Image (cartoon, rainbow, N blue to C red):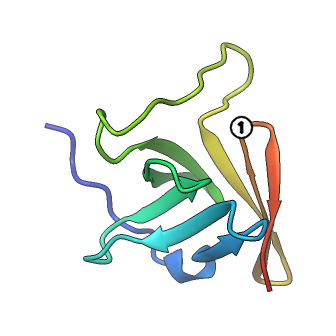
Protein backbone atom coordinates (compact mmCIF):
# COMPACT_ATOMS: atom_id res chain seq x y z
CA UNK A 1 0.00 0.00 0.00
CA UNK A 2 1.07 3.52 -0.73
CA UNK A 3 1.94 5.46 2.46
CA UNK A 4 -0.33 8.33 3.43
CA UNK A 5 1.05 11.75 2.46
CA UNK A 6 2.61 13.84 5.17
CA UNK A 7 2.91 17.61 5.21
CA UNK A 8 6.47 18.91 4.78
CA UNK A 9 8.08 20.48 7.88
CA UNK A 10 7.80 24.02 6.46
CA UNK A 11 4.27 23.55 5.08
CA UNK A 12 2.99 26.76 6.66
CA UNK A 13 5.13 28.89 4.33
CA UNK A 14 3.17 27.61 1.28
CA UNK A 15 -0.32 27.88 2.79
CA UNK A 16 -2.34 30.74 1.36
CA UNK A 17 -4.23 32.14 -1.57
CA UNK A 18 -2.70 32.82 -4.98
CA UNK A 19 -3.97 34.86 -7.95
CA UNK A 20 -7.02 36.28 -6.13
CA UNK A 21 -8.06 32.84 -4.94
CA UNK A 22 -7.70 30.98 -8.26
CA UNK A 23 -5.21 28.70 -6.49
CA UNK A 24 -5.40 27.87 -2.78
CA UNK A 25 -2.86 25.89 -0.78
CA UNK A 26 -4.03 24.57 2.59
CA UNK A 27 -3.32 21.90 5.14
CA UNK A 28 -5.73 18.97 5.32
CA UNK A 29 -8.21 19.01 8.21
CA UNK A 30 -5.94 16.79 10.30
CA UNK A 31 -2.81 18.75 9.30
CA UNK A 32 -1.12 15.70 7.81
CA UNK A 33 -1.04 16.77 4.15
CA UNK A 34 -0.49 19.88 2.05
CA UNK A 35 -3.27 20.36 -0.52
CA UNK A 36 -3.65 22.41 -3.71
CA UNK A 37 -7.03 23.40 -5.12
CA UNK A 38 -7.30 25.24 -8.45
CA UNK A 39 -10.42 27.24 -9.34
CA UNK A 40 -12.40 25.46 -6.61
CA UNK A 41 -11.82 22.04 -8.23
CA UNK A 42 -10.77 18.75 -6.72
CA UNK A 43 -8.03 18.86 -4.09
CA UNK A 44 -4.57 17.59 -4.99
CA UNK A 45 -2.01 16.31 -2.48
CA UNK A 46 1.39 17.99 -2.67
CA UNK A 47 4.31 15.63 -2.01
CA UNK A 48 7.78 17.18 -1.78
CA UNK A 49 10.23 16.08 -4.47
CA UNK A 50 12.81 18.87 -4.09
CA UNK A 51 13.24 22.21 -2.35
CA UNK A 52 10.02 24.14 -3.06
CA UNK A 53 8.87 21.57 -5.67
CA UNK A 54 5.96 19.19 -5.13
CA UNK A 55 4.42 16.37 -7.15
CA UNK A 56 0.62 16.62 -7.32
CA UNK A 57 -1.75 13.70 -7.18
CA UNK A 58 -5.49 13.49 -6.55
CA UNK A 59 -6.68 13.12 -2.97
CA UNK A 60 -9.41 10.79 -4.27
CA UNK A 61 -8.84 9.28 -7.70
CA UNK A 62 -12.54 9.64 -8.59
CA UNK A 63 -12.66 13.35 -7.67
CA UNK A 64 -12.23 14.99 -11.07
CA UNK A 65 -9.74 14.81 -13.89
CA UNK A 66 -6.25 16.15 -14.51
CA UNK A 67 -4.89 17.45 -17.77
CA UNK A 68 -1.91 15.36 -18.85
CA UNK A 69 0.83 16.32 -21.24
CA UNK A 70 3.69 14.27 -22.57
CA UNK A 71 6.06 17.25 -22.56
CA UNK A 72 7.70 18.66 -19.45
CA UNK A 73 6.65 17.55 -15.96
CA UNK A 74 3.24 19.20 -15.85
CA UNK A 75 2.36 17.50 -12.57
CA UNK A 76 5.06 19.30 -10.57
CA UNK A 77 4.11 22.45 -8.65
CA UNK A 78 6.95 24.90 -8.05
CA UNK A 79 6.95 27.63 -5.41
CA UNK A 80 9.18 30.64 -6.12
CA UNK A 81 10.67 31.80 -2.83
CA UNK A 82 12.20 35.26 -2.37
CA UNK A 83 13.62 36.47 0.91
CA UNK A 84 12.25 33.46 2.78
CA UNK A 85 8.65 34.01 1.60
CA UNK A 86 6.70 32.39 -1.20
CA UNK A 87 6.10 34.90 -4.00
CA UNK A 88 4.55 32.70 -6.70
CA UNK A 89 3.18 29.23 -7.49
CA UNK A 90 3.93 27.78 -10.93
CA UNK A 91 1.84 24.82 -12.07
CA UNK A 92 0.77 23.42 -15.46
CA UNK A 93 2.09 26.37 -17.48
CA UNK A 94 0.35 28.83 -15.16
CA UNK A 95 1.87 31.33 -12.74
CA UNK A 96 -0.11 32.37 -9.67
CA UNK A 97 1.18 35.37 -7.69
CA UNK A 98 0.73 35.12 -3.91
CA UNK A 99 -2.14 37.22 -2.59
CA UNK A 100 -1.21 39.77 0.11
Left or right: 96 with respect to 4? right
Q: Is residue 55 above or below residue 23?
A: above
- Give the residue displayed 46% in from the left and 30% down from the top: 65
Which quarter of the rendering shows the N terminus?
top left
Task: Mark 1: give few (<14), some (14-19) or many (20+) Cα within 10 Å.
Answer: some
Residue occupying the far front of the picture:
40
- Give the residue displayed 33% in from the left and 48% down from the top: 59
User: 40 or 31: which is nearer to us?
Assistant: 40
Which quarter of the rendering shows the C terminus?
bottom right
- Give the residue displayed 67% in from the left and 29% down from the top: 73
Q: Is residue 22 above or below residue 49?
A: below
Image quadrant in which you'd find residue 32: bottom left
- Give the residue displayed 21% in from the left and 48% down from the top: 3
User: 7 or 100: which is nearer to us?
Assistant: 100
In the rendered image, residue 19, in percent from the top left (x then y), is placed at: 78, 65
In the rendered image, residue 76, in percent from the top left (x then y), is placed at: 62, 41
Left or right: 57 with respect to 15? left
User: 59 or 3: which is nearer to us?
Assistant: 59
In the rendered image, residue 66, in percent from the top left (x then y), is placed at: 52, 30
Q: Is residue 81 above or below residue 78?
A: below
Q: Which residue is mark 1?
A: 92
In the rendered image, residue 4, in percent from the top left (x then y), is placed at: 23, 53
Q: Secondary structure at mark 1?
A: loop
Amino acid sequence: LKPAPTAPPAAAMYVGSYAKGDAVVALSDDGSALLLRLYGGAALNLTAVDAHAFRTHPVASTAGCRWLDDGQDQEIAYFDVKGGSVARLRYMNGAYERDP
